[in-house]
Image (cartoon, rainbow, N blue to C red):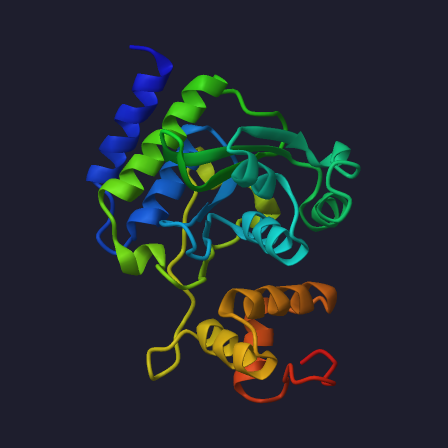
Amino acid sequence: MDEATRLLDELEAGLSTRARQESLATSVCRLCVELLDADGGYMAVSPSRGDELTVYSTDGRAERMADLEIALGEGPAHESFVGARRTVADLSAAWDRWPLFGPAASAAVGDLHLQVLPLGVGIRRIGVLTTYYESRGPQVDPRAAQALADGAGIALLGRPEPRALGFGRSRLEAGTEVPDGGARPGGRVAVAPRRERDRSGRDPLDLATGMVAVQMGVPAWAALAVMRARAFSTDVELDDLASAVVERRLTFDPGSAGPP
């Protein structure tokens, strides 16, 4: 059995036994990170053309890198998504390649090795899978790794779960951060449930995004990008900033300024 076949078989087996409370996209992200022997990662998915990218991450480091790519508009996932090709990079040497993302990511998560694989079926690309490695670069053969990413895309398209994939919405599903950003014992990477919702069942970040979109007169995806950029520039957690918006301690009306 070649490596690509083995990886695809293990992905299928893992998905067939996934926990009921875990969304399909979360399972695909977690399993791909494990099968590629990575220390963590994140997956950005846009199920159909024009939909916003929905991000699933396995840990704090992955979440911070995803936040930076969205806020700064550049980075390895952007490059792979636009070019529909595999991207590899070391953050320590990525400052010229991505002058905004490179230094910001190095400061936030350290000098990690990155691999980004486009997700899709044939020429149709629905997103990207980013994996990071602390002490060495990716060890899985690139062709086998891409075969796994293609299988992940097929799984997402073949068994759609609209609520899990976030059609028409932008949601960050972040994992529990592991000390020092590493994987849990045995190389298994845990993905935590979604953030707590308020009593009405609404996600505070979703509510804040809608409020900022109305305040600024921009689409929801642009409002979320502005919020992420504000959170990054003021060194505030995105959830805390969203709470400040919902509680009306912070507004994005023209002329408003200042952190929550």
Question: Is 163 above or below relative to 230?
Answer: above
Could you tell me which quadrant the C terminus lies in?
A: bottom right
Is residue 156 found left or right of 259 in the rendered image? left
Q: Nearer the viewer, residue 126 or 165?
A: 126
Q: Residue at the spot x=70%, y=42% of the render?
A: 110
Could you tell me which quadrant the N terminus lies in?
A: top left
Can you name the residue that lies furthest to the bottom here?
248
Question: Is 1 above or below relative to 176?
Answer: above
Where is residue 177? Give x, y as percent.
53, 53
Is residue 250 found left or right of 59 in the rendered image? right
Q: Is residue 237 visible?
A: no
Q: Nearer the viewer, residue 150 or 232?
A: 150
Q: Nearer the viewer, residue 228 or 21?
A: 228
Where is residue 224? Give x, y as percent.
55, 67
Where is residue 94? Give x, y as percent.
74, 36
Is residue 133 found left or right of 166 in the rendered image? right
